[in-house]
Amino acid sequence: MVTSKPQPTPMISSVRLIVDDSYSIDDPTLYHSIVGALQYVTLRSELSFSVNKVCQYMHKQQLTHWKVVKRILHYLASTATHGLRLYSSPNYSIVGFNDSDWASDLDDRKSTTGYCIFVG
C-alpha cells in the first residue's frame, strides 16, 4: 500500500459504520491482523478515533469496515514522514483536552469519549 493513492485524512467524517449481514469479507483473519497492528500506531493522536472505530467491529467485519481500514492504511502511507517535534519546556502546567461523541454508535447508541493530558 506504499504506492497507493494518498489520503488527506484517516477517515471520512460522514461515514457511519454499522453491523449488518449484507457484505461480509472473505478473510476475517487479515482484518484482525491489520486492525490489531493499527492499534500500535494510535500513538499518533489523529489516528486514535479511526482505529478505535474499526476495532469496534472485530467480531463482525463487513466490506464497509474493510474500506475504512484501507483508507487508514492509505493515509499512513502518505504521512509516513510526518511527525511531531517535542521540546522541553520550563512551564510545568497541566493541560487537558476532552472530546465526546454522544450516542453516535448506530447499533447500540453508546457514546465515544477521548481525552489527552499534557504536562509541561
Image: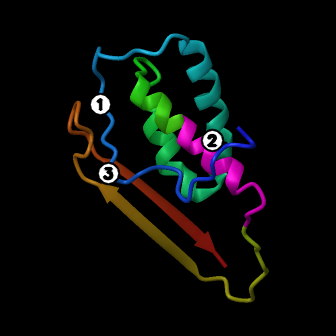
Q: Residues within 10 Å of mark 2 (few under 14, many from 20)?
A: many
Residue pictured at 67% horizontal, 43% vertical = 4
Q: Secondary structure at mark 1?
A: loop
* Type of the residue with mark 2: Leu
Q: Are marks 3 and 2 in contact (CB under 8 Å)?
A: no
Name the secondary structure under disc 2: helix
Quarter of the rendering occupied by the C terminus = bottom right
What is the crowding at mark 3: few (fewer than 14 residues within 10 Å), some, or many (at least 20)?
few
The first of marks 2 and 1 along the sequence is 1
Q: Is residue 3 above or below residue 12?
A: above
Please identify the quadrant where the N terminus is shown.
Answer: top right
Graded by Cα atoms within 10 Å as few (under 14), some (14 to 19) or many (20 or more), the crowding at tag 1 reads some
Residue 10 place in picture, x, y as percent: 53, 51
| Residue underneath mark 3 | 14
Give the main secondary structure, helix, strand or loop, of the magenta stretch: helix
Q: Are marks 1 and 3 in contact (CB under 8 Å)?
A: no
Q: Residue at x 53, y 14 (%)?
A: 28
In this rendered view, identify the residue nearer to me: 68 or 40: 68
Q: Which residue is mark 1?
A: 18
Which mark is drawn over residue 6? none
Q: Which label number is shown at residue 73?
A: 2
* Amino acid type shown at disc 3: Ser
Residue 81: say if magenta. Answer: yes
The colour scheme used here is: rainbow
The residue stretch that appears in magenta: 70-83
Left or right relative to 55: residue 64: left
Q: Earlier in the sequence, mark 3 or mark 2?
A: 3
Nearest to the observer: residue 27 or residue 58 = 27
Name the spot of residue 63 as percent of width and height, x first: 42, 24
Q: Is residue 41 left or right of residue 27?
A: right
- Residue 98: say if magenta: no
